[in-house]
């Protein structure tokens, strides 16, 4: 089953997406997401200029060998651009494999380990009152788990607050927007905010929060400790995780569960975090972490240490990634939770899909393969637009992690 054609489709139905399409000699098409928010064209070039010429004529059935060929064969290992490109190939090959067997992808990944996949939505607001309203809205839609982010008094902008009806997921045309940061303001606000949420919505609903890499380990320890009475499901990205051992310090101070990994790209980014049991949820995604093949290895390592998955699922990952993630989530034993932000109607019309949401849970559907397609003529109507993620400065102008 030779690969005879391959193309990279860049489109922007509201935001930029990069999609790889592989076609076999039998006419089976497989899709893989290759979107890296704010750096989209680098992955498109990596695929078009360096990978596609190597794929033509290869046997589409040899998924693991192709993964190793692209990873080891590049000599230059790891990194988000390389790993997103490899992921796109890997997912497209899994899509082809399952389509050639006429089964949904989860059936070739060992079958379903559960009936459906619990997802969490994103509540946000400029202040606590608005966020409470948004949180209640998600509960009325059936969500059993909701992430809550609120504007912080004294700061003119912060991470995670949606404006208007659009789901929050930044990418600004032309130049990066600037956000403001103050750890003091943030730490004063969040525990009170969570106290209100828990009081308002009772003990059952899972409440999540994303600190978005902005605290030092000891500050994160303090936040985790102060949140304990309100038992959050997790505290996400409490501190930048390049230095994995810094999580030891957080662990010494709090039992609040920790979730990390949306910016990681290989198992080596989380090996110490997992093996020392410094985290509770690993948030790596199919698209940025080398595809289904590599993410399964990460999940298998995590399973031994009782770390569960909690894959990133923001709207800057395409529906192709969302579909692949749901097959992974349904099949892997140590699944924890899946992030879900619905895409816009334009995006959904470019990427028709079989996955469904019902009552707080999702299912990938039973269409052969991943169950996500791309409408190429429609995609061609939405041209790529230069876009950047925001940057973040402290009140005195110092650059900070966004
Ligand atoms: O900032 O996907 O948990 N979700 C997140 C996201 C990330 C974006 C970056 O492109 O942290 O909002
Ligand atoms: Co996050």
Image: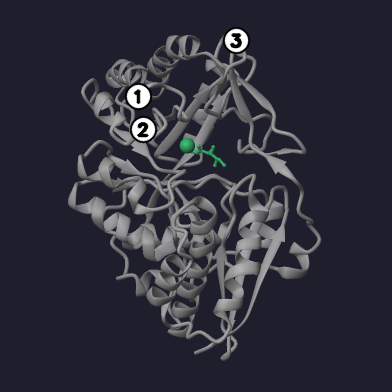
Contact flag, marks 2 and 3 (Cβ < 8 Å): no
**Neighbours of disc 2 within 10 Å: few (<14), some (14-19), many (20+):** some
Classify 10 Å Cα crowding around label 3: few (below 14), some (14-19), many (20 and above).
Answer: few
Q: CA separation, marks 2 and 3?
A: 38 Å
The answer to the question of whether label 2 and label 1 lie on touching residues, with beta carbons closer than 8 A, is: yes
Along the polypeptide, which appears first: circle 1 or circle 3? 1
User: Does residue 193 sit above or below 392 in this rendering?
Assistant: above
Query: Quick check: 156 above or below 91?
Result: above
Q: On the image, which quarter does residue 25 sit in? A: bottom right
Q: Position of residue 169 (x, y in %)?
A: 61, 38
Q: Which residue is drawn at the image coordinates 33% and 33% (left, top)?
A: 233
Marker disc for residue 202: 1
Q: Residues within 10 Å of mark 1 (few under 14, many from 20)?
A: few
Q: Is residue 363 visible?
A: no
- Foreground pick, 360 / 241: 241
Q: Position of residue 23 (x, y in %)?
A: 60, 81
- Report the residue that reaches farthest toward the front: 75
The mark closer to the camera, 1 or 3, is 3
Q: What is the C-alpha distance between the residues marked 2 and 1?
A: 7 Å
Q: Position of residue 220 (x, y in %)?
A: 35, 21
> To which residue does mark 2 refer?
205
| Residue indicated by mark 3 | 396
Q: Is residue 208 left or right of residue 398?
A: left
Can residue 120 be seen here? The reply is yes
């Amino acid at each position: 089953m030779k690969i005879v054609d391959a193309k990279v489709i860049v489109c922007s139905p509201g935001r930029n997406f990069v999609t790889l399409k592989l076609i076999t000699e039998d006419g089976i098409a497989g899709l893989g997401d290759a979107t890296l928010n704010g750096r989209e064209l680098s992955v498109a070039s990596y695929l078009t200029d360096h990978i596609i010429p190597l794929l033509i004529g290869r046997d589409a059935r040899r998924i693991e060998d192709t993964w190793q060929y692209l990873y080891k064969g590049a000599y230059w290992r790891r990194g988000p651009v390389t790993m997103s490109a490899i992921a796109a190939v890997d997912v497209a090959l899994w899509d082809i494999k399952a389509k050639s067997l006429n089964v949904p992808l989860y059936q070739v990944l060992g079958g379903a380990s559960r009936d459906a996949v619990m997802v969490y939505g994103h509540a946000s607001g400029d202040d606590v009152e608005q966020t409470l309203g948004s949180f209640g809205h998600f509960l009325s839609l059936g969500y059993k788990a909701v992430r809550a982010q609120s504007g912080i008094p004294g700061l003119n902008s912060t991470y995670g607050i949606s404006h208007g009806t659009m789901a929050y997921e930044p990418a600004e045309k032309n130049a990066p927007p600037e956000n403001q940061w103050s750890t003091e303001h943030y730490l004063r606000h969040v525990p009170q905010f969570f106290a209100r949420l828990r009081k308002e919505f009772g003990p059952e609903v899972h409440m999540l929060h994303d600190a978005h890499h902005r605290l030092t380990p000891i500050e994160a320890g303090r936040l985790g400790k102060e949140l304990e009475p309100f038992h959050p499901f997790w505290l996400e990205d409490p501190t930048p995780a390049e230095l994995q051992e810094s999580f030891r310090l957080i662990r010494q101070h709090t039992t609040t569960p920790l979730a990390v990994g949306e910016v990681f790209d290989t198992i080596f980014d989380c090996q110490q975090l997992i093996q020392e049991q410094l985290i509770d949820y690993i948030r790596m995604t199919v698209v940025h972490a080398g595809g289904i093949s590599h993410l399964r290895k990460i999940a298998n390592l995590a399973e031994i240490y009782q770390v569960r998955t909690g894959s990133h699922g923001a709207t800057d990952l395409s529906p192709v990634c969302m579909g692949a993630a749901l097959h992974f989530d349904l099949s892997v034993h140590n699944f924890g939770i899946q992030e879900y932000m619905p895409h816009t109607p334009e995006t959904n019309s470019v990427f028709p899909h079989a996955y469904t949401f019902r009552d707080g849970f999702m299912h990938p559907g039973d269409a052969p393969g991943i169950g996500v397609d791309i409408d190429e003529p429609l995609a061609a109507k939405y041209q790529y637009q230069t876009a950047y993620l925001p940057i973040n400065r402290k009140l005195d102008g110092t650059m900070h992690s966004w």
